[in-house]
Image (cartoon, helix red, strand yellow):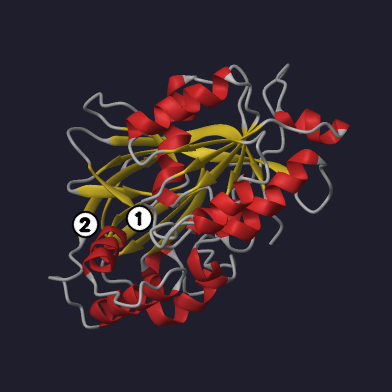
Amino acid sequence: MEEKINRTLPEGSDSPLDHSINGQSLQVGVLTNPRSGGNKKGLGKIYTILVQWPEVLHREASTLEGMTEALSFFAKNGVELIVINGGDGTVQALLTLIERAEIFPKPPLLALLRAGTTSMLPRDVGIPGSSATGLSHVLRWAKCPDPSLTPHPRSILRVQRGDGQPTQCGMFFGVGAICQGIKEFHSGVNPMGWRGQIMPGLTLMQMLLAILRKNHEKVPPLLTRSRLDGRPEEERLNLFVLISTLNHLFFGMQPYWGDEDNAPLHYTEVAAEPKYLFRVIPSLFRWQKNRYATPENGFVSHNIHQVELAIEGDFTLDGELYAVGQGPLTISAAGPVMFLC
């Protein structure tokens, strides 16, 4: 299915895309999270590359305070392209800071390296290859842009909690069994230090087995009350709800089949005890509606602009877990943000 993304920027804006079109080199800043899954084994290859590019600014940060300081430093020094050498949680934190704090007078172009444990976001809107290979590619491109990489505008999502806490931004939101799966993933034994899609795949298989056995202790049903784009509120007992601006999740999954055009958020929910679940699973990899994936069978999917979601417990944003707090959540579209991929 052809990608449906917003390729427009706010009227009158100037972005790093203009420089790439005109063939000008970009001022680059690299932000490294040394605690991300892919960086825990060492940053020797990254430093070897960076020493060859003395004009490139580099900062390490693993906390929100450190990331804020790094972004402020980049902004003061005219950085137009930020290379994020970290995991999905690092990307989520930086998207939040860039959107919330208005640090940059002009939105920077972002290049995401596969430096996390799962790296779901970079696999969709990032640089192919290892973090070292990706960094070299980006730095060469920034010096002399060519068609091998292209800036693409993509929407992100904004999460507002009803208790007035600061907004957060990211690209993948989930509740219910998705949060349970993340907890299983982090509590599981990974002696080999596997990265990529192996451990998420094993966790997914475990969760599917629990669902098949109707193990509600491991995968408890979640009561959700949702209002999509101002429509009447609907209450359901769901297995999970996900909302995303990514075109692909891990393993290339595309669990969306809404037919609304020009809506940036993909919304999908699956009932606590869906019918024909294993007949629907293949369609999750094709962005194509399965004839069994109907609301009557417990499968709902739409493309939307905003949803008000009332739940209890926690939610995940790009792999990080957060408490819902008091009142409903409001998830809406933000951006667009420019990604180099």
Q: Position of residue 337 (x, y in %)?
A: 60, 35
Task: Out of 250 and 259, give the one closest to the viewer.
Answer: 250
Q: Residue furthest right?
A: 22
Q: Secondary structure at mark 1?
A: strand
Quadrant location of the N terminus?
bottom right
Residue appearing at x 79%, y 54% in the figure: 148
- For marks 2 and 1, the one nearer the N-term is 2
Res 306 seen here: no
- What mark, if any, has residue 277 been given in the picture? none
Outermost left residue: 217
Q: x%, y% of residue 59?
A: 48, 36
Distance between the alpha carbons at the discs numbered 2 and 1: 9 Å
> Residue 21: x, y in percent?
84, 34
Left or right? Give the position of 215 relative to 241.
Answer: left
- The residue where tag 1 is placed is 241
Task: Determine contact: label 2, label 1, CB under 8 Å.
Answer: yes
Foreground: 124 or 308?
124
Q: Amino acid at mark 1?
A: Val
Q: Which mark is residue 222?
A: 2
Q: Nearer the viewer, residue 86 or 211?
A: 86
Q: Is residue 144 left or right of residue 218?
A: right
Residue 24 falls in which quadrant of the image? top right
The quarter holding residue 15 reads: top right
Residue at figure coordinates x 60%, y 21% from the top left = 77
Q: Position of residue 152 (x, y in %)?
A: 69, 43
Q: Around disc 1, counting alpha carbons within 10 Å, would you say few (fewer than 14), some (14 to 19), or many (20 or more)?
A: many
Asked if residue 33 can be seen in this view, the reply is: yes
Residue 216, above or below 50: below
Q: Amino acid at mark 2?
A: Leu
Task: In this rendered view, identify the residue nearer to me: 53 or 85.
Answer: 53
Element marked by disc 2: strand
Task: Answer above or below: position of 54 versus 88.
Answer: above
